[in-house]
Amino acid sequence: MFRSSKDAIFLFLRGINTNTYKTQSLQPIVRYLHTSDRIEGNQNGTKTSKDDYFAAIHHISNIVQRDFYMERTLNKMRISIDSELVYRVLRACSKSGTESLRFFNWARTHHPSYKPTTVELEELARTLARTKKYESMWKILQQMQTLHALVVSSDTLCFIIEEYGKQGLVDQAVQVFNRASKIFRCQQTVELHNSLLFSLCEVKLFHGAYALVRRMIRKGLVPDKRTYTILVNAWCSAGKMREAELFLKEMSEKGFNPPVRGRDLLVEGLLNAGYIESAKEMVKRMVKQGFSPDVSTFNSVVEVISKSGEVEFCIELYHEVCRIGLVPDINTYKVLIPAVSKLGRIDEAFKLLHNSIEDGHKPFPSLYAPIIKGMCKSGQFDDAHCFFSEMKVKGHPPNRPVYTMLITMFGRGGRFIEAANFLMEMTELGLTPISRCFDLVTDGLKNCGKHDLASRIEQLEVSVRGT
């Protein structure tokens, strides 16, 4: 793992001008940068900021990704290399496989004191797999075992198997799976089986996937939620609903019940595959039979269906499932309240808000802002103002996006004096308005003859922005 986080990293970065690497010049950073979780004072009582450290990481990452003569540029900089710095740079360059490998090789050859650890080596292997540099990836994995005596984790092997699957290279995925215990000394766990299952489903090898599940069971492994989800999603996306239902039924008969009910998995599988109408029909059948979907499944259903414009269906479904015992969570209301508010169903939005409060949830800005916006769109500016004031009294302080929305909506409605009041109230709370809000209010006040107030808003903008 990393060295002690209390070890200081001495960085001396100079602004470098080369023909191949163009970036904004950085002021020389000469700091002892501590990477602990908090900013600590040194013996002289001064403080060192993590911002300097991450600015240095960002600068080095830009060089790695953009400078054709990366090694030459890095050699001109006095950098104290350690495992954490290498890891952070590699993570920042996770989409640049060749460049990441060049940086790692530079760090290892030009700094003999640097000893690679599992963390940065596995990060590099993942980057190379992600960017399809498989030959280099295998060399790194081999070096981990032979040169550094490090063990490759099962998480990294799972990642590599799934990356092969995404590229349709299922034979290579199977090879990694088979070599896990022999070469990498890694047990073939449920997670490793799930990754191979994912790869098989990516190329539509359903018979092989089903055989893999049966093999899991014979080996005494218990399928988890992801096992079921991968296979059900794949079957649903291929339009094989019957196969998905039979699979869940067979698993249930063998005593391997999914962590969530089979119907919920089928509904989510249909949604993921884009079969919205089929998902709706299945949910309606469940409710008609007196069964309520799992709350996470219900949230997925209403989120997808509300985006398709069928908000009325979502409202009816909400009331039906609540009658048969579903207890909505805060995510339910985060989906439904904006949806009904956008539709102009303000009364329904208020009911949902009160229901959320009765369920023990504390309203927050993104929950009541859609209601205010819906009121403004309906021309109910006085009601919107009262509701906004009521929310503040009840201890729900508005944030910058809410004030911006209020100023914009009242300005569009020609209520420029109230918009100006919101603007001043916002600045009194230490929230800086965006330029568009100032422009909207000052132009509106001038157009309606309120030149004195417009002048005050302009002075406020100058004082806030210091220009």
Image: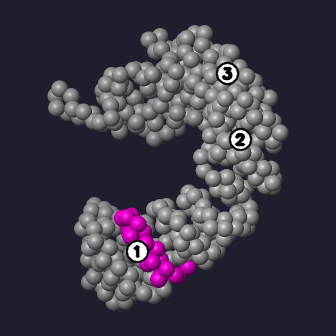
Task: Mark yes or no: residue 170 visible.
Answer: yes
**Type of residue at label 3?**
Ala
- Residue 175 in the image: state x and y as whole percent: 75, 24
Residue at x 66% of width, y 68% of height? 289
- 88 or 177: nearer the eye? 177
Q: CA distance from mark 1 to mark 3?
A: 54 Å
- Residue 322 in the image: state x and y as whole percent: 53, 70
Q: Nearer the viewer, mark 2 or mark 1?
A: 2
Determine whether the residue tagged by mark 1 lies in a helix, strand or loop. Answer: helix
Task: Report the span colored magenta.
Answer: 343-364
Residue at x 72% of width, y 48% of height? 248
In contact (CB < 8 Å): disc 2 and disc 1: no
- Residue 16 in the image: state x and y as whole percent: 46, 31
- 434 or 121: nearer the eye? 121
Position of 425 relative to 267 (above/below): below
Q: CA distance from mark 2 to mark 1?
A: 45 Å
Q: CA distance from mark 2 to mark 3?
A: 28 Å
**Type of residue at label 2?**
Lys
Determine whether the residue tagged by mark 2 lies in a helix, strand or loop. Answer: loop
Nearest to N terminus: mark 2 or mark 3: 3
Q: Quadrant of the C terminus?
A: bottom left
**Type of residue at label 1?**
His
Position of 94 relative to 240 (above/below): above
Position of 26 relative to 324 (above/below): above
Task: Mark yes or no: residue 443 visible.
Answer: no
Residue at x 60% of width, y 13% of height? 145
Report which residue position mark 1 lands on: 354
- 52 or 228: nearer the eye? 228
- 334 or 446: nearer the eye? 334
Residue at x 64% of width, y 56% of height? 264
Report which residue position mark 3 lands on: 180
